[in-house]
Image (spheres, helix red, strand yellow):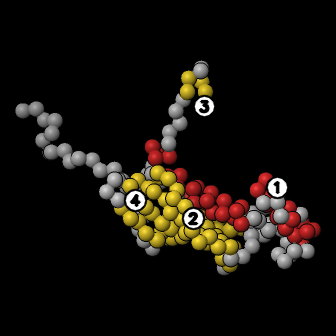
Amino acid sequence: MQSSGRQIARPTVAEHATVYADDFEAGQRIPLGCRFVSEEEIVEFARKWDPFPFHLDRDAAAKSEFGGLVGSGLHVLAILQVLEFEAVLHRTAMVAGLGFDEMRLHAPAYAGDTLTGSMVIRTVRMRADGRAVVTWQGLLDRGDTRVLSMEGAAMIRQRPTFPEVPDDAGRSE
């Protein structure tokens, strides 16, 4: 962002963090909300990133194994990512994402579907350097049907600790 020729620094996610690694615990389930998947969104994503006919063309999709227009697996993963970000990660003292494992597409996401997301915390491994590795299972469902699952991992800061100040600190005698 520019103003009067000077660079204005944007605050980082960590500077606005209210959620730290310490706030997560194994087994914790975090609801992420839901997202409607429109035909327009499917086609727009597919044009740029995954141009198979069953993502782009309603008639071709109707004749495919899916029987209708379906979202790309990468698009569905991106939907989970944005739900995770909007629900919790934007407030998290994130250092870096470490990766995704075991991503599975269990069922197609059709145009007109509403997908509901959740995260289940798997592990929180605290480190001596003030950071932790947090792993979770990310899930997207259409009603009772699982659409996507994956395992995610991220490096997240631990809650800052401050040195204790003696009770009489700052008092003049």
Q: Which residue is located at x 75 percent, y 64 percent?
A: 72
Q: Which residue is mark 2?
A: 100
Mark found first going from the N terminus, 2 or 4: 2
Image location of residue 104, percent across then percent down: 64, 73
Q: Secondary structure at mark 2?
A: strand
> As rendered, which of 156 and 92 lies closer to the eye?
156
Mark found first going from the N terminus, 1 or 2: 1
Q: Are marks 3 and 2 in contact (CB under 8 Å)?
A: no
Q: Most extreme residue toward the top, as rendered?
A: 4
Q: Which residue is located at x 79 percent, y 68 percent?
A: 70
Quarter of the image for the C terminus: give it.
top left
Task: Select label 3 or label 2 by which is in front.
Answer: 2
Q: Mark 1 Cα within 10 Å, few/some/many (few <14, many 20+)?
A: some
Q: Which residue is mark 1?
A: 47
Q: Which residue is mark 3?
A: 1
Image location of residue 119, percent across then percent down: 54, 68
Task: Select label 3 or label 1 by which is in front.
Answer: 1
